Image (cartoon, rainbow, N blue to C red):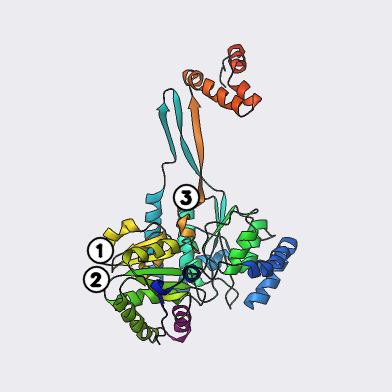
Amino acid sequence: MSPVAIHDLAKMSASARTELLERTEADLADTIKKVEPIIAAVRERGDIALIDLAARFDGVVLDRESLRISSDQIANAEKELDPEIVNAIRLSVQQVTRFHLAQMPEMLWLSEQTEGALIGDRWTSIDSVACYVPRGKGFFPSSAIMTAVPAKVAGVGRVVIVTPPGPDGSADAATRFIASLIGVDEIYLCGGAQAVAAVAFGTETVPKCAKMVGPGSPWVSAARQLLSNRIDPGSPAGPSELLVYADNSVPAALAALELTVESEHGPDSSAFVVTADRALAEAIAAAVPELWSTMGAYRADFSRTVLGGQNGGIVLAPSIEAAFDFINDYAAEHLAVLSTSAFELLPRIRNAGEILIGPHSAISIANFVLGPSHVLPTGGRANTASPLSVFDFMKRSSIAYLSQAAYHRLAPAARIFAGYEGFAAHANSVSEVRDRILSNSSPSTGP
């Protein structure tokens, strides 16, 4: 029996297919119960709770002063890093900045779509945002780039980074260097549910923020759910997930290579190749074990767990149509399309956070240095949600100006609507009452 699971859709019941679409983050009920007392502790005791929780969950002794990373630690972080990672960070920041600058909307547009009336939109940035940079199973400084750079491009007034403390009681040097490079001078050492609570309520040290963005554990997701009335929880970004569509126009080994990428994140990840070719499915499954031997035991064990179970492996579809039906129902965070006909297949795809087309569009390049943010909707939410972008850090106000002529042309219809819906004051505001008030008013003489 192959160590890589092969899920044959043609042999599955409807309920079994539905189970295959489920994610590990789908049911947070138990996690929510565990998170509730953490949130209560931070709300009631502020910094002291963060210090106690750092000792409990991170095994690190902090005090109020060390909850915030010093300006010297940020400014001098580059000296702690090898030149290779420094150069990679600089390239990533450059690419991500360029992409999001191109994404920026027209800040104000007005159009005379009806004679005598100007209507349009104005974009403004939000006041503050907390960018969550996880640790847990490793260091993820790229998340600082993918969240804080678009926030800075969008013009957010206050951008802060929250991240769990490392064993040395500090933040990862690469994360600190990124902060120095992009002009973020606030990094706070708190992770998990307590980080969400800290920026939702504010503590003596950690500022209250309007929004939180970034990927996180189920504990982070649960806290965001619970605190969504206190802070905008941002787009959902839970455990990593990947679908790879493959046909026989590409080597089986290439599909196997991409399949291992997201499966190494952790046992709660999801990663599938979807194909309508049985021979290809078997060849991909056979190619994976050799890749595990190159990964090291820690990451390979995660990948084996994912690819050998219900949350990963090969999905064998009875037809190309059935393959893309599954892909759209799954609505994956990442979707790689490995086919020489990839662009022809693109119209079949409706739901995916990220679509990587062709054999050279490697997931790792998109994750780190391509430009678009790697913070993508997970848990099937790509059917309605979008990748993190400058738009997550901005909001729109509708703008309208009516001339006197436009007012008189549109007011009768508005008055009819108001009467039909039973709003007397609404009707009065577009009646002769308004005309009388304006006719009796004196024109402004200005300052």
Local packing at callout 3 (Cα closer than 10 Å; few below 14, some 14-19, many 20+) is: many
Q: Which residue is mark 1?
A: 341
Pointer 2 or 1: first along the chain: 2
Is residue 367 visible in the rendered image? The answer is: yes
Disc 3 versus disc 2: distance between alpha carbons? 37 Å
Q: Which amino acid type corresponds to the residue marked 2 in the rendered image?
A: Ser
Name the residue located 61 percent from the left edge and 60 percent from the top edge. Answer: 224
Q: Which amino acid type corresponds to the residue marked 1 in the rendered image?
A: Ser
Indicate the secondary structure of the residue bearing disc 1. loop
- Left/right placement of residue 202 relative to residue 276 reads right
| Magenta residues, start to end | 294-307
Local packing at callout 1 (Cα closer than 10 Å; few below 14, some 14-19, many 20+) is: few
**Near-viewer residue (19 or 234):** 19
Which numbered disc, 1 or 3, marks the residue closer to the eye?
A: 1
Q: Which amino acid type corresponds to the residue marked 3 in the rendered image?
A: Phe
Disc 2 versus disc 1: distance between alpha carbons? 8 Å
For the residues labelled 3 and 2, say whether their Cβ atoms are less than 8 Å apart: no
For the residues labelled 1 and 3, say whether their Cβ atoms are less than 8 Å apart: no
Is residue 190 visible in the rendered image? The answer is: no
- Residue 114 appears in which quarter of the rendering? top left
- Left/right placement of residue 408 relative to residue 251 reads right
For the residues labelled 2 and 1, say whether their Cβ atoms are less than 8 Å apart: yes
Q: Which residue is mark 2?
A: 249
Expressed as whole percent of the image width and height from the top left, the position of residue 337 reads 32, 66
Magenta segment main secondary structure: helix
* Residue 331: numbered disc: none
Indicate the secondary structure of the residue bearing disc 2. loop
Local packing at callout 2 (Cα closer than 10 Å; few below 14, some 14-19, many 20+) is: few
Pointer 3 or 2: first along the chain: 2
Q: Which residue is mark 3?
A: 391
